[in-house]
Amino acid sequence: MLPIKNFESKLPLEYDFSISAEDEAERRGQVVQWPKDNEIQLDLDSEEALAEFERRFKDFAFQEIWQTPTVHKRKSFTEGHYHVTIEFADDLNNWMRLALQAALGDDPIRHFLAVRRLVYGCKTPSCLFAPIPSEL
């Protein structure tokens, strides 16, 4: 484990590590969207971040490492924000998932929190919140 001494958080108060992702999603009227073993998830907080992701994704040489992955984009609850899930043919470990998310432009605060969770032993350190599926 990495030593973190005298750490004073400068993060917004809504990042509360004492409650589960499921409890926070319920508080917000949402559900947790956990990545599958072969997926990465990006939280993009502006139109500019989405455009930067698209530029990076196009330039990224996936074909040299993996088959071309499948990309799913959707609008976030917050106006002008987007969630992107990228599905690969092969499974990814958490460090590879976080490295790819960072390289493709994931929200830096969300990404820092995911790294922190991973360092402290969280088995699935990264997730997104999604709308509750409507009942038919």
Image (tube, rainbow, N blue to C red):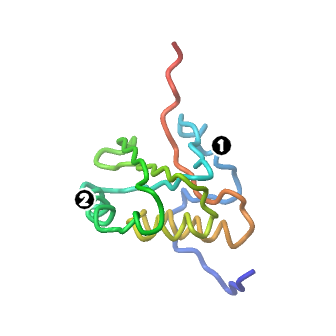
Residue 130 image offset from top left, x and y in percent:
49, 39
In the rendered view, tell whether residue 85 sits above or below residue 6. above
Residue 30 image offset from top left, x and y in percent:
53, 36
Q: In the shown orientation, is residue 84 left or right of residue 8? A: left
Between residue 10 and residue 118, name the one nearer to us: 118
- Secondary element at image label 2: helix
The structure residue drawn at horizontal position 69% and vertical position 50%, both measured from the top left corner, is 20
The structure residue drawn at horizontal position 52% and vertical position 74%, both measured from the top left corner, is 10
Query: Tag 2: residue type?
Result: Ala
Q: Residue furthest top?
A: 136
Question: How far is the residue under mark 2 from the one under mark 1?
Answer: 30 Å
Residue labelled with disc 2: 51
The N terminus, quarter of image: bottom right
The structure residue drawn at horizontal position 41% and vertical position 50%, both measured from the top left corner, is 84
Q: In the shown orientation, is residue 115 left or right of residue 3? A: left
The structure residue drawn at horizontal position 51% and vertical position 71%, both measured from the top left corner, is 99
Label 2, residues with CA under 10 Å away: few <14, some 14-19, many ≥20: few
- Secondary element at image label 1: helix
Label 1, residues with CA under 10 Å away: few <14, some 14-19, many ≥20: some
Residue 73 image offset from top left, x and y in percent:
37, 44
Q: Earlier in the sequence, mark 2 or mark 1?
A: 1
Between residue 58 and residue 50, name the one nearer to us: 58
- Would you identify the image quadrant in which residue 22 lies? top right
Residue labelled with disc 1: 22
In the rendered view, tell whether residue 88 sits above or below residue 23. below
- Would you identify the image quadrant in which residue 18 lies? bottom right
Residue 48 image offset from top left, x and y in percent:
24, 60
Query: Tag 1: residue type?
Result: Glu
